[in-house]
Structures are given as C-alpha cells and as structure tokens.
Image (cartoon, grey):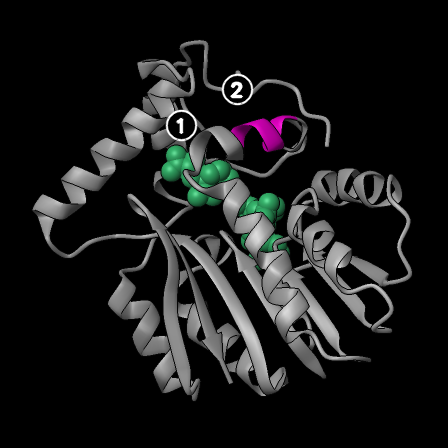
Amino acid sequence: MNSQQDTIYAAATDKISDFQFDNRVAGVFNDMIRRSVPGYAQIISTIGDFADRYVTPKSNIYDLGSSLGSATLSIRRQIEQRQCRIIAVDNSESMIERCQENLSAYVSDTEVELICGDIRDIDITNASMVVLNFTLQFLPVHDRDELIAKIYQGLLPGGILVISEKLRFEDNVIQTLLDEQHLDFKRANGYSELEISQKRSALENVMRPDSLSMHQQRFTENGFSHSTVWFQCFNFASMVAIK
Ligand SMILES: C[S@@+](CC[C@H](N)C(=O)[O-])C[C@H]1O[C@@H](n2cnc3c(N)ncnc32)[C@H](O)[C@@H]1O
Ligand SMILES: O=C(O)C(=O)C[C@]1(C(=O)O)C=C[C@@H](O)C=C1
C-alpha cells in the first residue's frame, strides 16, 4: 500500500484546526498510523487470523471506519471460498477512494461493498465478524453504547467483535507512564516535538479514549458472553468480544 511520508504537523501553525480524515490525511495515513500506533501491523495481521477462525460461510463481515482498507485486505486474504461479503464503511470520501484503489490491486473471490457513510447509520445483519479498528474513539461518547448494542444484535451466535483503541487510565501515574512511552515511540519513529504537540492539539476535541473498564462494562451490558484484551502496547489495546 503506497503512502507519502506524514509531515502534516511538521511546520509551525498559528491556529491548529481539529483533526479530520481529509484528503491530506488520507494521502499519508498508512505512514501516519504505523508511526503513531505501536503494534498496528501486528493488530492488522491478527485481525486476518481471527477472520480465519471465526468467519463462517455465507456470512457478512463489517469493517467500520475502514480507512485505506488494511483490515479488510487482511481479512479478505484469509477467507477465500467462503462466499462471504465484506462491508467496509467510512465517512471520509478521500479514504473510500483510496481504499477502492487498494482493494483493486489484489484479486479475490470475496465481494467487498465499500460504503461512504456514517457507521451509526449502517444496518448490521448476518455478521460473523465486526471490526472497529481505532474508530470507536472518534464517535461522540454518547453514541458508543448504541453502536455496540447494534453490533451485538447483528452478530450471529459465536460471532466476534474486534475493537482496537487508544486507552485512558484512571490512575494518573499509569496514565503518565504509558503516555510518555507512547511519545517516545513517536520520537523514535522520527516525529519532532512540534509535530507531536501540534497533532495532540488537533486530536484533543475529536478523539476521546475510554478506559478499559468502560469498554468491558459496555461489552457486558450489551450481552457479550466473553471478552478480553488480546493485545496491549503502552496506551493502545485491541480487544475481542464474542457473542
Ligand atoms: C483511525 S482511522 C481507522 C483505521 C483503520 N480501521 C485501519 O485499521 O487502518 C478512523 C477512521 O474512521 C472513520 N470514521 C470516524 N468516524 C466515523 C463515522 N461516524 N462513520 C464512518 N467512519 C468514521 C474516519 O474517517 C477514519 O478513516
Ligand atoms: O495518539 C496519537 O497520536 C495518534 O496518532 C493515534 C491515532 C489513533 O489512535 O487512531 C490518531 C489519529 C490517527 O488516525 C492515527 C493514530
């Protein structure tokens, strides 16, 4: 998957506007997410492994907030000949256009329906797998519960939900420790102090991480029988919940 280097926050700006998944971000997103999220490549490849285990023939798979299609591609590679349909949804036109190009670069017998729309407006039916890979954190907090309830309703018995998120910690000492580790990860990946602080300001109003206990409570209250964190690096985690 091609990507330009992310230099979006490299130059000093007087007024930082809220972060948006616009054309500029879509053009560098592959580089941005790999250099910003520890474990991203591992999470993408494991989503494919989960698909191999959980996706049942003739079912639907939903990739909600699909961006450039990395999770969709990882899933699609693992589910050949199961006559499934992947529904990939994103409300950024630029992401959808680039995702279409990325999907077209590979052949597969699995149909992918790409929808440019809001994940809150999508019907979920006959699903053996739903993926929210770093997307839920961008929804208004009061809409998160309803989305998880809708996903639970649309999942088949034994179906799997994979949610990856940045986490917030109630213990301030832990919050500071893991936040600092994450900043060191970004520095080691070539981001300057200016880039880090300007991006942080841009994300402040748009990305609101939940605590792990909040996620767990949401899974339980919405009926999921089993859930766990299967991956964590610093303040980034990926969870599974099984119906
Ligand atoms: C951090 S990115 C997701 C990364 C992607 N899942 C991956 O694995 O590479 C979040 C994506 O969610 C999309 N998004 C945010 N809120 C959305 C909403 N309400 N409906 C649809 N897409 C949304 C953004 O446009 C963005 O592409
Ligand atoms: O916390 C950060 O600095 C991040 O960049 C995180 C994060 C994310 O978790 O989705 C935020 C926005 C970009 O989409 C890529 C990564």
Name the kind of residue labelled 2 in the image.
Answer: Ile
Residue 243 x %, y %? 51, 85
Q: Is residue 109 left or right of residue 37?
A: right
Residue 196 x %, y %? 35, 23
Q: Secondary structure at mark 1?
A: helix
Q: Is residue 180 left or right of residue 116?
A: left
| Dot placed on the residue nearer the N-terminal end, 1 or 2 | 2
Dot 2 surroundings within 10 Å: few (below 14), some, or many (20 or more)?
A: few
Q: Nearer the viewer, residue 78 or 211?
A: 78
| Residue span colored magenta | 28-32
Q: Residue at x 44, y 32 (%)?
A: 36
Residue 203 visible in the shown view: no
Dot 1 surroundings within 10 Å: few (below 14), some, or many (20 or more)?
A: some
Question: Does 125 sit above or below residue 240?
Answer: below
Name the mark on residue 199: 1
Count all numbered tags in the image, as a single digit: 2
Q: Say whether mark 2 is within 8 Å of ligand 2.
A: no
Q: Say whether mark 1 is within 8 Å of ligand 2.
A: yes
Q: Quadrant of the N terminus?
A: top right
CA–CA distance in space, label 1 to label 2: 9 Å
CB-based contact (under 8 Å), mark 1 and mark 2: yes
Q: Which residue is mark 2?
A: 8
Q: Residue at x 65, y 66 (%)?
A: 51
Q: Residue at x 36, y 76 (%)?
A: 218
Q: Secondary structure at mark 2?
A: loop
Q: Is residue 61 left or right of residue 186?
A: right
Name the kind of residue labelled 1 in the image.
Answer: Lys
Please tell me whether the stretch drawn in magenta is mainly helix, strand or loop.
Answer: helix
Q: Is residue 58 left or right of residue 217?
A: right
Residue 186 visible in the shown view: yes
